């Protein structure tokens, strides 16, 4: 008898069901005692047999709450399938409480509809029971965090209407991650930009999770690809900082301290501080532009090396062509070797800069900032040296205009002075770090001695 019931469910045969009920009026009441994994209503929901499901519910409304082996109700299956009419019919008999039923993974029908982006079903379920969207399943993620993880942008937009902007800014999962954290971790740029358009979420962008990390910090622990670079740039543009850059002082107190300090400092000190601190993330933002610039310099060096001043001469021997030699090698081999050395150094330094930029090292690190700055200055110096040497090679009798010589010398001097200033500041920073570390170590030893006494 039960086998015939399930065969009728598979076919959606209402007449066969009526015949079975005429033979045994309790057949639907004994379903819970059978060994089948799903109830007939589960099968009807999966097979989209709406008429059959309606007849089942009129005969036994309790079937709406029946569970399969995964603790899923028929509404779970209909919502995951996006069957809007079946969802409405099940809700008509099962009521509001059916929306809050959880399966083996702690997911409600709304979760499954949102994950499959069945927007009309999502809207109906939210209208019947809005509170079901705000409950956190066993996974520890809110339904919004799940939409971010699976990149369900349309479902995300529909569901965010259940919260105001202030509430959205404070929603976290069990790890303390806000929606911005989730968007950064999963590098969901579209959702990230949508969130940053909301003033409250943007203002709360520096919130830290339970590991003490801001959305910009968690991005440093993810794989570094093009999407990660774009996500980092968008967060920085929105004013999101790393936790090390956050200041515990209130803004009025900070402004008063800054104003008093600026009065005590001289013009040069204020200018230098502004140069260093006005835009903490300039190098990070311009990483892509710097890569292109360094590559252009490297390509120019390669081109100059393959096309030296004066060109090349193609020789023939025994009626066969040979690769051309640089003209300068026939005139002055020493000068040509110097040109090749300067040009090669320029190319290698430029490629080294590209390597640092694409390696993913945080450019806020003072060491890498110093390396990048010194490398760029050296590349510019050797570009000028190569240019000047090329002029002497192609100029009549090696004569170069005095004005050009002075311009090259002044430029190299300016680069040298700037490199010296950056090096001095870097050395001072290293010395201060080492002295601070040493003092902390000494203090720790003294504290241990006091404890032992």
Image (cartoon, rainbow, N blue to C red):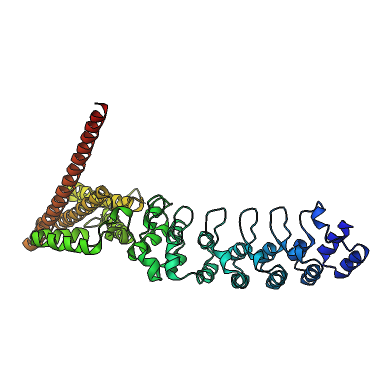
Q: Quadrant of the C terminus?
A: top left
Direction from residue 292 to residue 34 in the image, left or right: right
Residue 167: quarter of image: bottom left
Q: Residue reaching furthest right?
A: 23
Could you say where residue 30 lies in the image, as x and y percent from the top left?
Answer: 83, 57
Residue at the farthest top position: 453
Q: Residue 216, located in which quarter of the rendered image?
A: bottom left
Q: Nearer the viewer, residue 369 or 104?
A: 104
* Residue 393 visible from this viewpoint: yes
Left or right: where 322 falls relative to 9: left
Residue 320, horizontal then vertical, whole percent: 36, 50
| Residue 322 visible at all | no
Q: Does 332 appear above or below 279?
A: above
Furthest toward the front, the residue is 453
Which quarter of the image is occupied by the N terminus?
bottom right
* Residue 86 versus residue 150 in the image, above or below: below
Indicate the quadrant where residue 76 lies.
bottom right
Q: Position of residue 293 (x, y in %)?
A: 29, 60
How many tags in the picture? 0
Q: Position of residue 225 (x, y in %)?
A: 42, 55
What residue appears at the point 21 percent right and 43 percent down from the top-left corner?
433
In the image: residue 110, left or right of residue 209: right
Camera-nearest residue between 204 and 271: 204
Q: Nearer the viewer, residue 34 or 387?
A: 34
């Amino acid at each position: 008898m039960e086998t015939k019931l399930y065969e009728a469910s598979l076919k959606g045969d209402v007449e066969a069901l009526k015949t079975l009920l005429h033979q045994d009026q309790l057949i639907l009441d004994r379903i819970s005692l059978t060994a089948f994994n799903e109830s007939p209503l589960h099968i009807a929901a999966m097979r989209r047999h709406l008429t059959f499901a309606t007849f089942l519910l009129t005969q036994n409304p309790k079937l709406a709450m029946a569970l399969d082996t995964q603790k899923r109700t028929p509404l779970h299956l209909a919502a995951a399938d996006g069957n809007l009419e079946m969802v409405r019919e099940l809700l008509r008999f099962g009521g509001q409480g059916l929306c809050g039923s959880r399966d083996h993974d702690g997911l409600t029908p709304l979760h499954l509809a949102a994950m499959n982006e069945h927007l009309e079903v999502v809207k109906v379920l939210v209208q019947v029971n809005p509170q079901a969207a705000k409950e956190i399943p066993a996974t520890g993620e809110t339904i919004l965090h799940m939409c971010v993880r699976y990149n369900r942008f349309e479902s995300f937009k529909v569901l965010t209407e259940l919260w105001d902007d202030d509430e959205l800014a404070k929603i976290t999962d069990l790890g303390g991650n806000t929606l911005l954290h989730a968007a950064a971790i999963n590098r969901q740029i579209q959702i990230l930009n949508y969130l940053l358009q909301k003033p409250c979420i943007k203002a709360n962008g520096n919130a830290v999770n339970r590991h003490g990390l801001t959305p910009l910090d968690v991005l440093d622990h993810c794989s570094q690809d093009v999407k990660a670079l774009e996500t980092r740039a968008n967060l920085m543009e929105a004013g999101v900082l790393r936790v090390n850059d956050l200041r515990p002082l209130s803004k009025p107190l900070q402004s008063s301290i800054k104003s008093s300090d600026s009065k005590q400092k001289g013009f040069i000190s204020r200018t230098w501080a502004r140069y260093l601190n006005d835009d903490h993330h300039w190098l990070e933002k311009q990483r892509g532009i710097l890569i292109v610039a360094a590559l252009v310099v490297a390509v120019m060096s390669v081109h100059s090396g393959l096309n030296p001043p004066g060109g090349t001469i193609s020789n023939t021997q025994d009626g066969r062509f040979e690769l051309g030699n640089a003209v300068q090698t026939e005139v002055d081999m020493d000068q040509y070797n110097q040109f090749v050395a300067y040009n090669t150094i320029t190319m290698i330094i430029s490629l080294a800069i590209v390597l640092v930029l694409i390696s993913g090292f945080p450019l806020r690190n003072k060491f890498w900032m110093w390396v990048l700055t010194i490398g760029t200055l050296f590349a510019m110096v050797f570009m000028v040296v190569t240019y000047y040497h090329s002029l002497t090679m192609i100029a009549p009798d090696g004569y170069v205009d005095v004005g050009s010589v002075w311009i090259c010398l002044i430029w190299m001097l300016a680069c040298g002075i700037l490199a010296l200033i950056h090096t001095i500041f870097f050395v001072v920073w290293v010395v201060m770090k080492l002295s601070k570390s040493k003092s902390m170590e000494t203090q720790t030893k003294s504290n241990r001695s006091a404890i032992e006494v």
